[in-house]
Amino acid sequence: MIYYGISVQRRSMRRYRLLTSLVFFIAYVGSAFAEDLSRCVSSLVLPTSNVFSRNSAVGGIVTADVTIGEDGGLSRLDLDGPTYGLKAEVGVYLRQSKFAVACAGRKVRMTFEYKLEGERTYEVVPPKIIFRPPLSFTIVVRPGKPTVN
């Protein structure tokens, strides 16, 4: 009976070693073939005027899928987000950004998370922008008070 227990332990240990080796191998191969697309960004214009975002009722995440054109500009921009205003704000600034010509035809995904923090104000307070690799940005905006004409 003791031999059986030792045998079972050895088999399970072999399976564990095999499984961990396989996991590390897959992670290594994945990292070897993964492409860092952040090098395709030459200059990135970030949303700082916050015209739409400060007047937004909610924050949210805008995902931008950028297809790089042959001239280093955008050949295509697909935006997904909670409101038209937030998507428009990201779109205006990304169209002013420049990308590496060597990356023409490639797609780059960026995320812009808008957070509304603080008391509403009539003043335009510059946003706080936090960068998280590879291409993720958190934009903290102070909400604006509604204006009455």
Image (cartoon, rainbow, N blue to C red):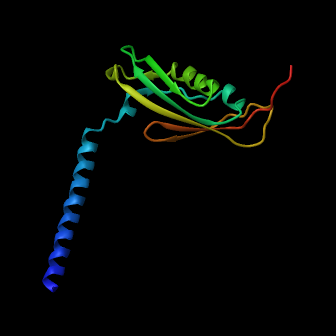
* Vertical comparison of 75 with 85: above or below: above
Measured as percent of width and height from the top left, residue 125 is found at: 72, 34
* Vertical comparison of 61 with 7: above or below: above
Quadrant where the N terminus lies?
bottom left
Q: Residue placed farthest to the right in the image?
A: 149
Quadrant where the C terminus lies?
top right
Looking at the image, residue 94 sits to the left or right of residue 33; the answer is: right
Q: Of 142 and 5, which appears nearest the observer?
A: 5
Location of residue 139 by image quarter: top right
Measured as percent of width and height from the top left, residue 118 is found at: 74, 43
Looking at the image, residue 56 sits to the left or right of residue 77; the answer is: right
Q: How many marks?
A: 0
Looking at the image, residue 13 sits to the left or right of residue 55; the answer is: left
Looking at the image, residue 31 sits to the left or right of residue 116; the answer is: left
Measured as percent of width and height from the top left, residue 73 is found at: 43, 17
* Vertical comparison of 93 with 54: above or below: above
Location of residue 69 by image quarter: top left
Residue depicted at x 70% and y 42%: 117
Location of residue 3 by image quarter: bottom left
Residue depicted at x 59% and y 28%: 47
Residue depicted at x 57% and y 20%: 92
Residue depicted at x 39% and y 14%: 71
Q: Residue placed farthest to the top in the image?
A: 71
Q: Residue placed farthest to the bottom in the image?
A: 2
Measured as percent of width and height from the top left, residue 106 is found at: 35, 24
